Image (cartoon, rainbow, N blue to C red):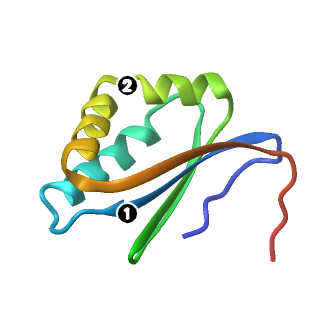
Amino acid sequence: MIAGTPDPPYYAVIFTSLRTEGDNGYGAMADEMGELAKQQPGYLGIESARNELGITISYWRSLEDIKNWKANARHLVAQKTGREKWYEHYKVRICKVERDYEF
């Protein structure tokens, strides 16, 4: 679904990834991270799609909120496991959304 975000400015974290073969606990951890992110101060929403290439965009009120999410203890475990067994490659981009519109 399309995340409902407030009027700009706000921030987007774009996580683009190539997965390894098999689930290996990935699905359960992804669900857990989605629920945990919703509980974090400054969280605004998330959008995600996966075929060969996965793209997940999370939206945040501030850069400080993004920094705090990155440092969350359980999220650190997911990041480490991702590097060790779930991802062949990934890239993170952090952007300031200055304008949005919709139809």
Q: Secondary structure at mark 1?
A: strand
Going by the numbered disc 2, the residue's amino acid type is Asn
Q: Which residue is mark 1?
A: 18
Distance between the Cα atoms at labels 1 and 2? 23 Å
Residue drawn at point x = 74 percent, y = 40 percent: 10
Q: Is 54 placed above or below 65 here?
A: below
For the residue pair 42 and 80, the one nearer the viewer reads as: 80
Q: Position of residue 75 (x, y in %)?
A: 33, 33
Residue at 30%, 54% (x, y): give it. 87
Q: How many marks?
A: 2
User: In what quadrant of the picture does the N terminus appear?
Assistant: bottom right
Image point (20%, 43%), residue name: 84
Where is residue 17? Give x, y as percent. 42, 59
Position of the C terminus, as image quadrant, is: bottom right
**Residue 4, placed above or below residue 74:** below
For label 1, count other residues whose C-alpha is less than 10 Å away and answer few (under 14), some (14-19) or many (20+). some
Can you say whether 86 is above or below 48 in the image?
A: above
Residues packed near mark 2 inside 10 Å, few (<14), some (14 to 19) or many (20 plus): some
**Image mark for residue 72:** 2
Q: Quadrant of residue 71?
A: top left
Q: Nearer the viewer, residue 66 or 24?
A: 24
Q: Amino acid at mark 1?
A: Leu
